[in-house]
Image (cartoon, coloured by chain):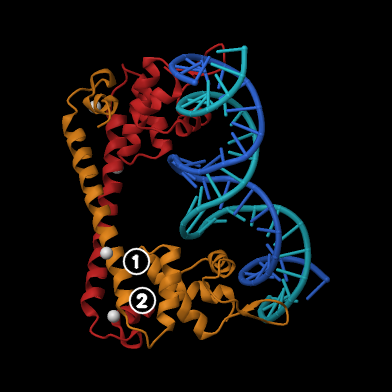
Chain colours: A orange, B red, C cyan, D blue
Amino acid sequence: MRIGELAIATGTKAETIRYYEREGILPAADRTDSNYRDYSDNHLAALTFVRRARQLGFSMAQVRELLALSDRVDNPCQVVDELVREQLEEVEQKILDLSSLRDELRLMLRSCEANRIGECRIVESLARPLR
Amino acid sequence: MRIGELAIATGTKAETIRYYEREGILPAADRTDSNYRDYSDNHLAALTFVRRARQLGFSMAQVRELLALSDRVDNPCQVVDELVREQLEEVEQKILDLSSLRDELRLMLRSCEANRIGECRIVESLARPLR
DNA sequence: TATGCACCTTGTAGCAACTACAAGGTCAAG
DNA sequence: CTTGACCTTGTAGTTGCTACAAGGTGCATA
Ligand SMILES: [Zn+2]
Ligand SMILES: [Zn+2]
Ligand SMILES: [Zn+2]
Ligand SMILES: [Zn+2]
């Protein structure tokens, strides 16, 4: 299949696919006579793996590790599990951070009783010293 | 005050302060005879405002808007409030997205009953087609 | 007075993970 | 035979900083 088909099949822009190849995340495809990239089902599977890991919030570096690990079918899977656990911890931390952000924004919104910017508590609370 | 003091006072790196000046987020400071930047309390207040808005997750573009608005003390504050409301909506959406990520990662972790990568459901679920 | 050291200056380049051109080649349909 | 969709490479832009490099300044100390 050509790059455009692979792009549609995986919901990835063609430019991103070429970028992954440049970065060594995806193996290079065969070329047709006219130098078009020609992808196999293996490429489809690999790109699917990559995109899914990226959607799950794994960094490119983590995706590289996951790809390398997933090839070693006979190795114990603890290392994979640990990567997932670390990613889970990071996501949980981000949720906590965003939740306090959300609380603060909600407080700010509730605080506005003025209609002039000069008296708006929202503007005031932005101008408050940093904690 | 010099850039280093302002940096400490606001918890901002000197390089970031210069970057804000380049970007027009902060007004340029006066210069001493030896060409050092010389900041006033107004600069301190402005940078504090910027940093707080950034900590609350506002983009640089939004910070620009907030700064412009906060100067027009006689204008109605609805526009500011609306910016905050939009930011709140974005944060809430991010929390939702991360929460489903978290759920999926938790599911993956619970699914691993193998000890070989070849049978690990975690690896399987990464290789699954994209939704 | 020298000298060491922290601080300041400008300018440039790098980070992540793409995304967006530009300028041109290929291929099938009408 | 031309149109239009697709492909190629290469380069540069995005966001919000951060990290140098190479040199100038200011002040305490030997
Ligand atoms: Zn851990
Ligand atoms: Zn208000
Ligand atoms: Zn809205
Ligand atoms: Zn496992």
> The numbered mark 1 sits on a residue in which chain?
A
User: What kind of element bears circle 1?
Assistant: loop
The image quadrant that residue B42 belongs to is: top left
User: What kind of element bears circle 2?
Assistant: helix
For label 2, the crowd category at 10 Å Cα-Cα, with few meaning under 14, some 14 to 19 and many 20 or more, is many
- Relative to B127, say whether B70 is above or below: above
> The numbered mark 2 sits on a residue in which chain?
B
- Relative to A100, say whether B72 is above or below: above
Q: In which quarter of the image is ligand 2?
A: top left
Residue that carries the numbered disc 1 in the rendered image = A56
Residue that carries the numbered disc 2 in the rendered image = B126
In the rendered image, residue B8, in percent from the top left (x then y), is placed at: 36, 28
In the rendered image, residue B73, in percent from the top left (x then y), is placed at: 31, 17
Residue type at mark 2? Leu
Instruction: Quarter of the image for the C terminus of chain A: give it.
Output: top left
Residue type at mark 1? Leu
The reply to whether dot 1 and dot 2 touch (C-beta < 8 Å) is yes
Residues at marks 1 and 2 on the same chain = no
